[in-house]
Amino acid sequence: MDKLDNIGLRAVFSLILMLGLFYMPAPAFSQDEVNIQNLILNGGFEEGFQGEFGVGYGWGGFSNGNASVGWNGDAWDKVVVAGENAQLIEIKDAAELNRYAGIYQTVAVVPGEQYKLTIKGLVRSSEGAIEVSDYGYRLQYAIDQDGGTTWELLGDEAWVELPWDEQPLDDPSGGLYRIDTFETTITAKGEQLTLFIRGWKKWINNGSGIFDLDEISLVGPAPTGFQAPQAQVAAVGNSAITGETESGMNDELVSAQALPENDRLASAQPQTEASSEAIVSTQTDDCL
């Protein structure tokens, strides 16, 4: 009897096991099966810069004029986060309040998916501290969820201020700069979005603000058939571009003086000293 009972129990157990396997739900897709990519092209600015006016390949440039503004590849190892280059943006000699200059890039995304945006860099100024400039130089970003490239169409509420306080222009305390990091999560609403990043000079004066950007990324699910976006020709509104030298940097800064009617571009090739030192920092770390 015991043997029959054991055989019966084993048969019942085997049947339950087989039914459980048969009705087991299909496994969910693992994270490895999702095509997670950094969708930003040349976010580390190691692919070079457009020789016409110093904006990184893959990026567009913009400004609102009435100040001397400029873009350049910055190879100074004290401000480069990783690799050998960062994107430099300068605004100085403002003739009106609230002068802006920045860069932008449009990427393909998956509607409804979340993406992690990371921006690294620092803000420098001739005043060297927020107490002296009265928060005169700030950095902001905005997202156009329709993939548009006209930054003026974005309302004030679209612009998010990064909590990065300015540091001395070329003589940091103790010889070290603080490398700042900003991170946030963005939910895509359409099949394209545009990331805008701009420097902001608030006051009318001859002070100079320099915004160094590096290691910009937008990481998340790539759309089907994803390919790296093509480098786009940057457009600088209401600006003319000339060559000028940034004090203490030994680099030729490509600057733009606002012209209200006629726009023109003049070619300037940056001459910089490359750095081989890679620096990886967080918001509170110092540049080594």
Image (cartoon, rainbow, N blue to C red):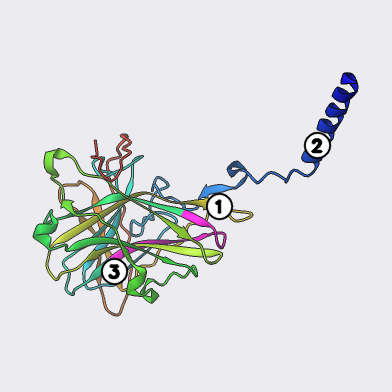
Residue 129 % position (x, y): 13, 54
| Residue bearing mark 2 | 16
Residue 70 % position (x, y): 27, 61
The circle drawn on residue 221 is 1
Question: Which SS class for mark 2?
Answer: helix
Q: For the residues carrying marks 1 and 2, which lies nearer the camera in this image? A: 2
Name which of mark 1 and mark 3 comes first in the sequence: 1
**Splitting the image into 4 quarters, where does residue 98 fall?**
bottom left
Q: For the residues carrying marks 1 and 3, which lies nearer the camera in this image? A: 1
Instruction: Relative to 212, say whether 27 is above or below.
Output: above
Residue at the left extreme?
132
The circle drawn on residue 265 is none
Mark 2 and mark 3: span between their CA atoms? 78 Å
Name which of mark 2 and mark 3 comes first in the sequence: 2
Residue 185 % position (x, y): 43, 56
Q: Is residue 55 visible?
A: yes
Question: Which SS class for mark 1?
Answer: strand
Q: Which residues are magenta?
A: 101-115
Residue 286 % position (x, y): 23, 40
Quadrant in the picture for the C terminus: top left
Q: Residues within 10 Å of mark 3 (few under 14, many from 20)?
A: many
- Marks 1/3 in contact by CB < 8 Å: the verdict is no
Mark 1 and mark 3: span between their CA atoms? 39 Å
Q: Is residue 266 visible?
A: no
Q: Amino acid at mark 3?
A: Ala
- Which secondary structure is most common in the magenta stretch? strand
Q: Nearer the viewer, residue 226 or 114?
A: 114
| Residue bearing mark 3 | 240
